[in-house]
Image (cartoon, helix red, strand yellow):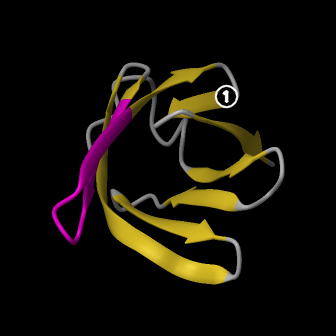
Amino acid sequence: MTNTSGPGEYVGMWVTADGLIRHNLLPNGRYEEARGTREHAYQGRYEIKADHIDYWDDTGFTADGKFVGDVLYHAGMILHRRR
């Protein structure tokens, strides 16, 4: 994982307002995405540079997003940091 914004600044749980989509950014550069009752819907690796995140799902799917404060904009979704 590359994070030029500061060590672990974005690590942790990011959740949509309705709680259905949950991204857990792990400190080892891996992520787990839960959707509804599917706790491990997607898994893969991520890399962060400044406020930009790139995802590489284990199935080969790629995506990206942007952090603005405590909000993550990703694939048309808005996720908020859960503290």
Type of residue at label 1?
Answer: Val
Comparing 32 with 62, the one in front is 62
Which image quadrant is residue 53 in? top left
In this rendering, is residue 24 above or below 69? Answer: below
Q: Is residue 47 left or right of residue 26?
A: left
Magenta stretch: give its range: 53-64
In this rendering, is residue 29 above or below 2? Answer: below
Residue at 16 percent of width and 63 percent of height: 60
Q: Is residue 19 left or right of residue 57?
A: right
The furthest residue to the front: 76
The crowd level at tag 1 (other Cα within 10 Å; few <14, some 14-19, many 20+) is some
Comparing 61 with 11, the one in front is 61
Q: x, y (%) of residue 76?
A: 53, 33
Q: Secondary structure at mark 1?
A: strand
Q: Which residue is mark 1?
A: 71
Q: x, y (%) of residue 68?
A: 60, 17
Q: x, y (%) of residue 52?
A: 37, 25
Comparing 27 with 16, the one in front is 16
Residue at 59 percent of width and 70 percent of height: 34
Magenta portion: prevailing SS class: strand
Total tally of numbered discs in the picture: 1
State yes or no: residue 2 in magenta.
no
Q: Is residue 82 left or right of residue 33?
A: right
Residue at 83 percent of width and 52 percent of height: 18
In this rendering, is residue 61 above or below 48? Answer: below
Residue at 51 percent of width and 65 percent of height: 33
Comparing 1 with 42, the one in front is 42
